[in-house]
Image: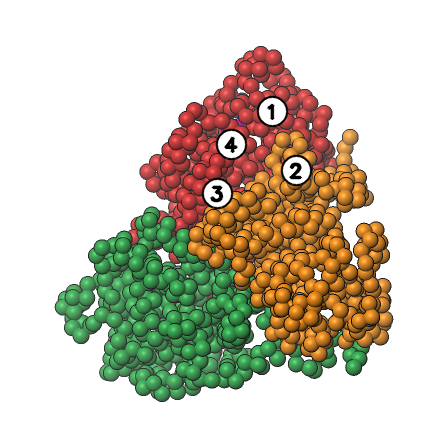
Chain colours: A green, B orange, C red
Amino acid sequence: MSEPPSPAGARPADDLSQDDLDLAQYESRLARPVSLKVADLQRGERLRHVIFSGQFTPALLEDLAETADTIRQLSKSATGQAFLTGLLSHKRAMLYFTQPSTRTFLSFMAACQILGITCNEVRDPRTSSETKGETRFDSIRMFSSYFDLIIMRSPLARLAESCAYLMNDLERSDQRSVPIINAGSGADEHPTQALLDIYTLQRTFNFENPHDSPVEKLEELQTAHGYADLRRGLANKCYAFCGDIGRGRTVRSLAMLLGAYEGVRLVFVSPDHPTLRMRDDLRRRLRDRGVKFHEVDSLEAEVDGQPVIERLDALYMTRVQQEHNNPEDAEAFAKIDFSRYKLTPALVTRMRAYAPILHPFPRDQHFGEIPPEIDRDPRAMYFRQARNGMWVRAALLAHLLDVDSQIRRQGLREFSERHEYSS
Amino acid sequence: MSEPPSPAGARPADDLSQDDLDLAQYESRLARPVSLKVADLQRGERLRHVIFSGQFTPALLEDLAETADTIRQLSKSATGQAFLTGLLSHKRAMLYFTQPSTRTFLSFMAACQILGITCNEVRDPRTSSETKGETRFDSIRMFSSYFDLIIMRSPLARLAESCAYLMNDLERSDQRSVPIINAGSGADEHPTQALLDIYTLQRTFNFENPHDSPVEKLEELQTAHGYADLRRGLANKCYAFCGDIGRGRTVRSLAMLLGAYEGVRLVFVSPDHPTLRMRDDLRRRLRDRGVKFHEVDSLEAEVDGQPVIERLDALYMTRVQQEHNNPEDAEAFAKIDFSRYKLTPALVTRMRAYAPILHPFPRDQHFGEIPPEIDRDPRAMYFRQARNGMWVRAALLAHLLDVDSQIRRQGLREFSERHEYSS
Amino acid sequence: MSEPPSPAGARPADDLSQDDLDLAQYESRLARPVSLKVADLQRGERLRHVIFSGQFTPALLEDLAETADTIRQLSKSATGQAFLTGLLSHKRAMLYFTQPSTRTFLSFMAACQILGITCNEVRDPRTSSETKGETRFDSIRMFSSYFDLIIMRSPLARLAESCAYLMNDLERSDQRSVPIINAGSGADEHPTQALLDIYTLQRTFNFENPHDSPVEKLEELQTAHGYADLRRGLANKCYAFCGDIGRGRTVRSLAMLLGAYEGVRLVFVSPDHPTLRMRDDLRRRLRDRGVKFHEVDSLEAEVDGQPVIERLDALYMTRVQQEHNNPEDAEAFAKIDFSRYKLTPALVTRMRAYAPILHPFPRDQHFGEIPPEIDRDPRAMYFRQARNGMWVRAALLAHLLDVDSQIRRQGLREFSERHEYSS
């Protein structure tokens, strides 16, 4: 019955830690396909936890965009501001970011603050409690004791999902339980980044606001510019992704979401190297869904008899994630002509007049995938994209905390006619 | 008259620093017994600074519990929330935590936010000003210039108390002065932890709410369960503390507070080793107060002819603070059978049906003093305890900032009949 | 066309980085004299960005002091507090402090919170985005996407100014643009410190409030104390600066601001060493403006046939910034009698009865330029100064965000007669 004489009777080192056992208990739930998990993360029609981009259907994306539009409109008037900041001023969020990301972190902070939610943060990879032997799940339950919402970013691929299941189990046994939002888990999922990419495309392809659309009038584009077949919305368009396709989790998530729209065509432009080109799992998932896609190694490559750069309706540039290079990649990478994966003013000139340029940011000044000369082109939508992220994350929070219909009603009260889109 | 040629005329190294002199000037006040200090920390009947758990009388503990109950009730309704977050929205707190503690820190943050207080923090062990030669007292006066309340946690045993005296002196000379709350000072005092332990026991021994009491109906316990003598309240009960009694400052504070209730019996369960068993000063203080207590080395040991585990009305488990082990302890500790100080499902089965299990948290997954299998037992009250801490700390802030009677009045306005206790 | 085979086609190392190019594009604007820049930093009569202390005219300083006085008055009543915290509760500030300063940081936090502004912070010298190759300007534009105001402190001398020009350019091209406040840039400028120094002098030389003026009644000073010529206000007074004149940027800024008042005389007291005495640029600028000043090496030195310590109307003490010592200074410094640059109770006794002692803080306990024995002298105004900083920074924010006239109107509504000055 006596313990081994290691420090104060600790378990032997080859044993599994309680942290390991905690995750292991959810193994069978974690192993299910996403489609089976989705119901676990909802309550009725409403999301309870946000873990995968696969939870966002086109219908929900429309709904969130409408809430986001209403929030940004309301934030322009004094009564709207007072309404918004009073809406959830009794709620407290925990931003638990053990994987650093200033951009995502600040965007969520701002989104919370727009709705009056008070923010708290833990950003150290190891909290003081963990150094005293506390399990991750005990930490999460501590956060759920004090706060009403946990927004978490972790290098552990499945942690956010497991925490959602922990919260579900607590809920079932009538104990305190709060929503979990995945703000990036390992190399795996970053659902709210995909959300803001989509929202940016939604606004651009509305052709209503000069800040969101390089050319604002759809009619003008159809006639004067000669894009006779151009229609509003995300369906039936050609989206090109350029750069580090293999390691870009935002590419993966956005591609899958776009694949749910009708008649969409995707083009992946990357060096033909296993680290950088599309991974098998995405290829398989797109095929399973019947999405049309092309893999090419240059923006000059032809698709439907036209160079990609001239054909695309939207261009999604990415940073080459060199901090994740393997030592064995170095030699092969030295032979790659990376200049093909950098945008230039000359290339931009050849793009369609209305086609937005997106980038998940940060961009890399040393690589130069988008040189700053391009920033002033009306097609450069990447700064706008950041602010869009704040609004649509606020809309997501409003959805989770069930105040979105209240927001819509307030919107209707304030604006008698249809929304005007502006900055 | 000229200074020695050390860097820019600094004082010689063997001199006392101004920091030392600052503390030295309070030496005579610091040396008094707690009972003499209490008046210095009050203004009339109301606490001004919170430094020692000895400041909490049973009457004050009842008062704080009632405020805490009212706050948690108000926080359930929209009007109650609006009332609470507007209450102190013009107040700004400084959380000055040079000794890290995520749990205590977040609990105070949440408590402040419930009442609308804005939080600011300094958590670096050395602020930038201190590296420029600023004294601790100058730092504290800077905080008191900008903020309305200082919540501090320091590895220096007497710093919080000295700061309270500094504030008293400023008040006397008609200068700006703010309340000081001790959120843990060295190995010495952690008064608000004792506060939340007591509040958890108060709620449990109210036998009113299924979330707080393993068995909710006192009558049922007296008849069906055969605990005919069981009564509401903290008096006349047996409290057992198990684990690291010697180094647990929460044990020390809680034991002293419980000793103020009538007919209480305390049992301390620890290995018979000078580092781990009760210290002389606590033993002496309990004897001086005439509190009945027992020291045993196992939960199976008999007290009043019954094994402790079956006899106790509440069990307070603790973590063995191995990070504070001395090198000379290692050999002796290797011979101790630490399994006696870990709770097991089998032991829990033998506990009284209503007896709550508490733990100051974090628990140690490697040592395993409470394995997670026990979490689902209705007697496991340690997660609940954390949330209780937030509410009672909010009540303490309300008391210090003199809005507690306003809260009670609002409570009466909102609930016509007596409080219902719920999550 | 192919890139050199360095990591993924990065630009060669001897190239200028984009960060360098970004700053270079503003070179011609940065090189202009301050007087030409001032208009760029205003919109009409109102400041848009706060970069230089040279932007503060005596008229603006009067205006800000009046707003600050009103804010502190309003903050004393419940209706005033509610008015203030509701005023800008929809605004979010970014405090971007890559050069640490706890004091300035907390003062701005408190100032924001007084007006209801929500604060966010980035304090790491390198954000996670910068390690991924993001330029400083991209970081600033990210902040401007999420927040309504950027308060920045940087070791780079011209960064805040360049960011103001970036924001101006964005504004011109109808893109999102927010105000920039310089909270300290390198060894160069710290305009809001000068602001709080001036505000402290304004309050002291109003002779109205016992907390702000060592002797409160001007009449009494003129008659009983024999200062027959003493008048209200900053003009026609003698200001002495003592200690590290060469490296004190607060000295430089304050001296220039005081030089704009009529009949002012400045005395600079420092060791006669090139590191510590007045720099040529300040000497030249004061001469250009026709300001009367003296350079002496002791508080005992005579000015107008009177020792400085007896002649001065206000004394500005400073810390010797030893962390900036050059190795070659060590030998020369060892020969300096630094005791001449430390205040003593004996010296204070000889000062005029009404003359305030200021210090930008932190003071250095090891050097001891102001020993704490002096803290209780009514002339010691340095703690008061800190709290003044909070109020006048709040006034500056109110000015920038155009709510100052709203504040004045509320002030008139609350107080029928003229302001009473109190703590």
Q: Residue at x 43, y 37 (%)?
A: C55
Distance of label 1 from label 4 (alpha carbons): 17 Å
Within 10 angstroms of label 4, few (less than 14), some, or many (20 or more) residues? many
Q: Residue at x 26, y 63 (%)?
A: A213
Q: Are marks 4 and 3 on the same chain?
A: yes
Q: Are marks 1 and 4 in contact (CB under 8 Å)?
A: no
Query: Which element type, helix, strand or loop, lies under badge 2?
Result: loop
Q: Are marks 1 and 3 on the same chain?
A: yes
For mark 1, what is the residue? Answer: C214
Q: Which of labels 4 and 2 is toward the front?
A: 2
Distance of label 4 from label 3 (alpha carbons): 21 Å
Residue B344 versus residue B328 in the image, above or below: below
Front in this rendered view, residue B243 or C57: B243
Front in this rendered view, residue B268 or B86: B268
Magenta run includes residue A289: no
For mark 4, what is the residue? Answer: C198
Residue A7's x, y, as percent? 77, 73
Q: Which of labels 1 and 3 is toward the front?
A: 3
Marked residue chain, label 4: C
| Residues rendered magenta in the picture | C197-205
Residue A61 versus residue B292 in the image, above or below: below
